Amino acid sequence: MKKNKILSVFAAAALMVSAMPFAGISANADDTDITGNTMLTAEELTLNKVVSSEASGSSDYDWYVFTLTEPSKINIICQNPGNNSFYFSVYDEKNDNSVVYKPSSSIVSSVNATLYLTAGNYYIDLNSYVSSFTYDLKVTSTPSNLSFDASAENNTMTEAIPVDFDMDYNAQISQNDNIDYYTFELPKEARVTFNFTGALDNIDWNLYDNEDDLIKHGIYQKDSENDTKVSKRKSLILKEGKYTLSLESNKTSPSYGQYSFSLNALENYGETAVNGIISFGDINKDGKVDSGDASVILSYYAYRSTNTTNPETDMNKWVADKLGISEEF
């Protein structure tokens, strides 16, 4: 049975004066009811607060429930002073109480996990492996501040969220929501540039036409292991019409996290003179022909003048290599 499932703020403060974090916080009195011993009687867990309790053997199941009001990044820490072994699982109520997280090893002595989850109720089940032991549990949450309603279900093409050009959007690929669909209307043929930044290792993308037929697909991933995020800017020449874009967790190497994106469209992408600036067009693929393109051209010729041994003579290739952009999403 659990003991002192949740310590009072004052008692916890007194116990923690001389203790290291997540250590030395134990319970002292028997729990006289079965609250928290099943999913149906799970005890409410307050986010960002330490819970200290005791597991009393293999037949004692400790259940907790916590609520996310919006998609969030969460961190779960569970430790016990004696490094005793236990089972640990997290369940998603909205998805038929399916397991949304379980350590790679079925039996662990501690848990330190970062998850990206949608809004909803989540249950934690902690079951001692053999003997009784005390443990400390804490769940912290950081809202992802999405640009869309937290209840939006854009998980299918028919539920795609309409997005506008020249707008910045924030979203999240979650363990329990690993695909997002967006749709946009292109009134005239244009060069459409997709700007993407994500705090994840990789992400798959697909582009569909107004018949919902796949016309382009690929993967964005970090350029090196030292990168902290994926950052890409790609372009495509598209005819007028309606398009749907999907972003989803890579199937062979899943990755989750927050991301931002925007779409830009340049209709007169072939013009060589805009706003009095002589240019070869939208050189830096930012959806505009302006002084930024002229700056890139000057940088290229500066490169040519200082690199006389086998310089790159194809400016478009040099721009693609230098800025990491190309003529494809």
Image (cartoon, rainbow, N blue to C red):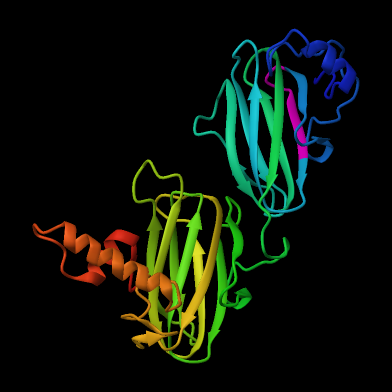
The answer, for residue 329, to whether it is visible in the render is no
Image position of 133 (left or right of 305)? right
Quarter of the picture containing the C terminus is: bottom left
Q: Quadrant of residue 169?
A: bottom right
At 48% from the left and 92% from the top, the residue drawn is 188
Nearer to me, 45 or 306: 306
Image position of 93 (left or right of 329)? right
Toward the top, the furthest residue is 18
Q: Magenta residues, as a range?
A: 56-65
Residue 222, horizontal then vertical, whole percent: 38, 51
Nearer to me, 218 or 284: 284
Image position of 180 (left or right of 22)? left
Q: Quadrant of residue 8?
A: top right
Q: In the picture shown, does residue 12 fall above or below 283?
A: above
Q: In the picture shown, does residue 28 fall above or below 106?
A: above
The answer, for residue 20, to whether it is visible in the render is yes
